[in-house]
Image: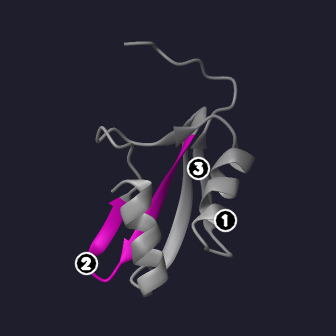
Amino acid sequence: MDERLLRAMVAAGAVKTISIIANGARFHVEARTPNGPITAETRKGKVRTWATLDAAARWVRGLGVGGAHINLTHWQPGQRELSI
């Protein structure tokens, strides 16, 4: 779901919790709704990722959400990405 739709869902109260999840050296955002989890995507439909935790947190704060759960279980800050 892209930022515009996610922002509308937050405003409508449909988002119960937000999680910032680390995977390798990148972070992505997942929103929990009554219908299940939704991952933040770009307008082209790819998973939206951030290189730093603070960048992801600023984006979440910009949605109008004051708090988020952070999952660092699979975080490996030194891992390099494969460009495909």
Quarter residue 43 falls in: top left
Range shown magenta: 27-38
**Could you say where residue 81 lies in the image, as x and y percent from the top left?**
52, 19
Sequence-wise first label, 3 or 2:
2
In the rendered image, the quadrant that contains the N terminus is: bottom left
- State the separation of the CA atoms marked 3 and 1: 22 Å
Give the residue at mark 3.
73
Q: Is residue 69 left or right of residue 33?
A: right
Residue depicted at 70% across the width and 55% down the height: 58
At label 2, which amino acid type do we have?
Answer: Asn
Sequence-wise first label, 2 or 1:
2
Q: Is residue 7 magenta?
A: no
Sequence-wise first label, 3 or 1:
1
In the rendered image, the quadrant that contains the C terminus is: top left
Q: Is residue 1 left or right of residue 66?
A: left
Residue depicted at 33% across the width and 38% down the height: 46
Give the residue at mark 2.
35
Q: Nearer the viewer, residue 45 or 28?
A: 45
**Could you say where residue 35 lies in the image, as x and y percent from the top left?**
25, 78
Q: Looking at the image, is mark 3 or mark 1 nearer the viewer? A: 1
- State the separation of the CA atoms marked 2 and 1: 23 Å
SS class, disc 2: loop
Give the residue at mark 1.
61
Other residues around mark 2 within 10 Å, as few (<14) / some (14–19) / many (≥20): few
**Could you say where residue 28 lies in the image, as x and y percent from the top left?**
51, 47
At label 3, which amino acid type do we have?
Answer: Thr
